[in-house]
């Protein structure tokens, strides 16, 4: 049985600036306050608290809603909103349709213009990885579709553009980036539809690349052919198992008494936050501490352990790994594969998958995680030292590489 929402009586009053300021959002519905002074003008308050001025007028037996713009502090003042509403109603009396005219005007822009608006008004404010998507759009989409009307781009246009991209994964990533632009454009009323919808993405397989014992030694030696800061960052990924983006942004103030403390939440301008938004502590093994000691006085006062020449967090580690694997003639290895190799070393030494997930900061949503608040600090320190010992033994070609410390029953096993 479908339950109908109860009808709400229209809220009508002479709107004042104080009315706008005190308009409170409701969690379950939009609040429309009609102005009794200027006919057809209303103040619309979303559940999020966002307020807009809207003109509502009849057109061919249906109501048209024309959004004038934002209301509230620093937005369109009440007097100006009333003037704009009066001008819109004058057009209506002349037989025009201002809402349709506005949509038509906004849809005249090219895709390149839509993309720029998306970056400025949305992506740079809400999407931490906007630069990656922007690079894909500029490389693959702008040359083919940039000068076309954004509203006129069809599904066939998108498919033709994607067909010029060789790698299936790159096709998928470009399609996702393009779809995000159009989704925003539809939401903002700039384009009528998203042409990326219903386009089938290429099937992909999860990577399971783990370095072999011999490859660990080869790749480690090849690190030394890179810029020293890049090399140190990649070695730290392998020795800690943490995400490459988090290692790149490692901060000096987060290293305390042999531990790296990763804040879960982002710190604007200096720290991106962890992937699962959960704070995390990583025990730093002796080899890692030696690396960090070398760069202790080389951050240029920026606070980044691995600072590039511009003083910002080091970047382009994927490019470094591509160069290394091409030089060595081995199957492709990414920075994330170094993290996976660390995790696999944890389990290969007998410490168990639960220990691996804990150290790699995989989200644990099990019931047990709610009740088990034990810190595992001693176990994690032992595990990290054991994994580092195993890796360094392979790097140094020592015969005792297979004899590093295994878990002791009841102490480090998990």
Image (spheres, rainbow, N blue to C red):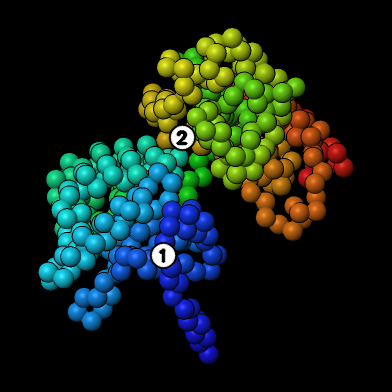
Q: Which of the 4 quarters of the picture holds residue 254?
A: top right
Q: Residue at the location (86% across, 39% down)? A: 411
> Where is 7 relative to 197, above or below?
below
Q: Which mark is residue 404?
A: none
Q: Secondary structure at mark 1?
A: loop
Q: Nearer the viewer, residue 199 or 52?
A: 52
Quadrant (top left, top right, bottom left, bottom right) of the C terminus: top right
Q: Is residue 335 above or below residue 252?
A: below
- Residue 21, percent from left and from top: 48, 53
First in sequence: mark 2 vs mark 1: 1
Q: Nearer the viewer, residue 216 or 63?
A: 63
Q: Position of residue 167 (x, y in %)?
A: 30, 45
Q: Please name which of the two marks, 2 or 1, marks the residue nearer to the observer.
A: 1
Quadrant in which residue 151 is drawn: bottom left
Instruction: Judge whether 232 appears above or below 42 on screen.
Output: above
Decide if residue 220 is in sight here. Answer: no
Q: Residue 181: x percent and y percent?
A: 31, 50
Above/below status of 356 relative to 246: below
Residue occupying image coordinates x 61% and y 16%: 291
Q: What residue is disc 2 on? A: 334
Q: Nearer the viewer, residue 95 or 335?
A: 95
User: Could you tell me if residue 359 is visible in this image?
Assistant: yes
In whole angstroms, how far apart are the C-alphas of marks 2 and 1?
Answer: 63 Å
Quick one: which residue is furthest to the top in this view? 297
* Marks 2 & 1, CB-CB < 8 Å contact: no
Neighbours of disc 1 within 10 Å: few (<14), some (14-19), many (20+): few
Residue carrying label 1: 14
Residue 270 on image: x %, y %: 53, 28
Residue at 75% across, 22% down: 257
Q: Secondary structure at mark 2?
A: loop
All told, the count of numbered labels is 2
Residue 349 versus residue 342: which sits nearer the camera?
Answer: 342
């Amino acid at each position: 049985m479908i339950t109908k929402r109860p009808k709400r009586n229209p809220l009508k009053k002479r709107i004042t600036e104080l009315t706008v300021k005190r308009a409170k959002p409701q969690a379950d519905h939009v609040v429309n306050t009609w102005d009794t002074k200027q006919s057809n003008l209303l103040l619309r308050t979303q559940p999020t608290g966002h307020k807009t001025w809207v003109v509502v007028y009849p057109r061919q037996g249906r109501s048209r809603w024309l959004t004038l713009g934002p209301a509230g502090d620093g937005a369109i003042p009440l007097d100006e909103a009333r003037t704009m509403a009066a001008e819109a109603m004058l057009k209506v009396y002349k037989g025009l349709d201002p809402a349709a005219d506005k949509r038509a005007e906004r849809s005249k822009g090219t895709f390149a213009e839509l993309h720029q608006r998306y970056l400025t008004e949305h992506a740079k404010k809400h999407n931490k990885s906007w630069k990656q998507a922007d690079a894909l759009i500029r490389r693959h989409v702008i040359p083919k579709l940039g000068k076309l009307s954004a509203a006129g781009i069809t599904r066939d246009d998108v498919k033709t553009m994607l067909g010029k991209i060789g790698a299936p994964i790159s096709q998928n990533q470009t399609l996702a980036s393009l779809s995000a632009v159009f989704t925003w454009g539809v939401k903002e009323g700039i384009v009528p539809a998203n042409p990326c919808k219903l386009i089938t993405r290429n099937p992909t397989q999860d990577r399971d690349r783990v370095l072999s014992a011999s490859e660990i030694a080869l790749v480690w030696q090849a690190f030394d052919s890179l810029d020293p800061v890049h090399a140190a960052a990649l070695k730290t990924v392998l020795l800690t198992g943490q995400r490459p983006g988090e290692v790149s942004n490692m901060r000096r103030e987060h290293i305390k008494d042999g531990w790296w403390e990763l804040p879960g939440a982002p710190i604007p301008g200096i720290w991106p936050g962890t992937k699962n938004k959960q704070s995390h502590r990583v025990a730093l093994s002796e080899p890692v501490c030696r690396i960090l000691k070398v760069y202790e006085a080389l951050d240029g006062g920026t606070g980044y352990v691995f600072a590039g020449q511009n003083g910002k967090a080091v970047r382009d580690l994927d490019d470094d790994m591509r160069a290394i694997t091409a030089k060595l003639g081995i199957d492709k290895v990414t920075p994330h594969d170094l993290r996976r190799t660390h995790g696999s070393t944890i389990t290969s030494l007998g410490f168990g998958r639960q220990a691996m997930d804990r150290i790699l900061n995989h989200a644990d949503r099990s019931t047990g995680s709610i009740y088990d608040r034990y810190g595992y600090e001693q176990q994690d320190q032992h595990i990290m030292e054991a994994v580092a010992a195993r890796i360094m033994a392979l790097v140094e070609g020592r015969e005792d590489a297979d004899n590093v410390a295994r878990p002791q029953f009841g102490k480090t096993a998990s």
